[in-house]
Amino acid sequence: MRTKPSSKSSFFYDVIIIGGGPAGLSFARALADTNLKICVIEKQSEKILASPPEDGRDIALTHLSLKIMKELDIWPEIPAKEISPIREARVLNGTSSYFLGFDSQNTGKEALGYLVPNYLIRRAAYQSIQQWKNIDLMTDVSVLDSSTDANKGSVALSNGMTLTAPLLVAADSRFSETRRKMGIPAQMRDFGRVVIVGRMEHDLPHNHIAYECFHYDQTLAILPMNRKQSSIVITLPADKVAEVMAMDEEEFNTDIEIRFESRLGSMRRIGKLHPYPLVAVYADKFYANRFALMGDAAVGMHPVTAHGFNFGLRGADTLAREIKSALHLGLDIGAESVLEAYHTQHRRATHPIYLGTNALVWLYTNTHGPAKFLRSALLKAGNILPPVRSLITGQLTETPRNKNVA
């Protein structure tokens, strides 16, 4: 990998990726074993990409993501002691002790999924491209304009350079400026809520059980990390955020203990809390002329079903496979047929879960009587009807495609 083109380098590439987050870097790594010349453009510094700061977010990875990350040499870059298996998941409604439960027994796996700190995934994705000389990484630079014609796409950069390639790919966040400039509309749903994330230690073992507690004023997720620690995800109305962020540690600890009904005994906050506004995004199309969307620029999920980065990684894998197939057949990698095939596959994989997640969020944040009744009924139906529970488990873990994953 070169950090930037030299003064003698051509400004022509085969693929230009806008956004050096984990989705964009994973896509670059997925194409690294081809003869394609790839450029990744990132507005942050290379120092931040190489050593990202802790941001409080922990990502629940599915088995499909694990498989892809192993294939891309990303997984070995994550310290084993930071990988926490989720062996069981429980969904609770209000103050009821009844829960909808999922476990890994019928999946043939040791766990439903694996929890990994986001900053370590970002670092591992960066490290995975280091050895590849056909990948240029341009940092501290922004895309000022982008366009395509019948033969190529072009990007004008803040450093005065103009780059061209047969294919442009945007992986520049759910608020993608490139998506807008390329004329692709997106559905946006502002939930009017904020997630506050952090980490806590506790006296009792969590037994690698993840909890999603749908209270009537806020949602609390407790996700098992290694040792007696858990990742805490609080979802609450935006106008309540300042109150929680202003709590001192003792007040915050007591509040979480009470909300979680002391299941883990005494709990103590570790480090800072980090707030993130909740806005879901789904692009109307994942491609335009010689242009494709990836990661949150294509699908930005509500975190309740933990599919955000998993969809980004899946999209990177899908598009890379379509491009490699086109190369094998001697076809144009930026052709509409290639990009449409990617769009069709990725939409089929993501759209039902996107709609289902938003419906779930609406139902479990609705405090009206009929919604409360339906919430309880759905939990019971999930337990009583094994096919329903198996379907949900398969969607959450993405195990059907990965039966041979270790």
Image (cartoon, grey):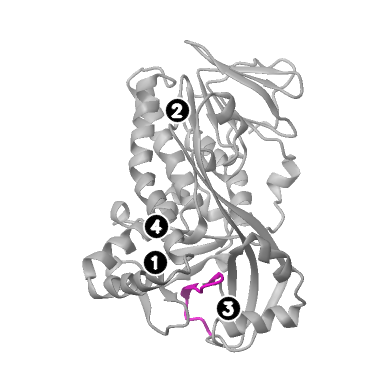
Query: What is the CA distance from the residue labelled 1 to the residue labelled 4?
Result: 8 Å
In magenta stretch: residue 212:
yes
Crowding at label 2, few (<14), some or many (≥20) Cα neighbours within 10 Å?
Answer: many
Q: Which residue is under mark 2?
A: 287
Name which residue type carries label 3.
Arg
Residue topped by disc 1: 112
Q: How many marks?
A: 4
**Residue tagged 3:** 227
Say which element carries label 4.
helix
Instruction: Please name which of the two marks, 2 or 1, marks the residue nearer to the observer.
Output: 2
| Lower position in the chain sequence, tag 2 or tag 3 | 3
Q: Is residue 121 left or right of residue 401?
A: right
Cα distance, mark 2 to mark 3?
A: 44 Å
- Which quarter of the image is occupied by the N terminus? top right
Instruction: Name the disc covering residue 63, or none.
Output: 4
Of badges 4 and 2, nearer the viewer stands: 2
Relative vertical location of residue 401 with respect to residue 85 in this rendering, above or below: above
- Residue 331 drawn at (x, y percent): 36, 17
Tell me which numbered mark, 3 or 4, is placed earlier along the sequence: 4
Q: Residues within 10 Å of mark 3 (few under 14, many from 20)?
A: some
Residue range of the region highlighted in magenta in the rendering: 205-222
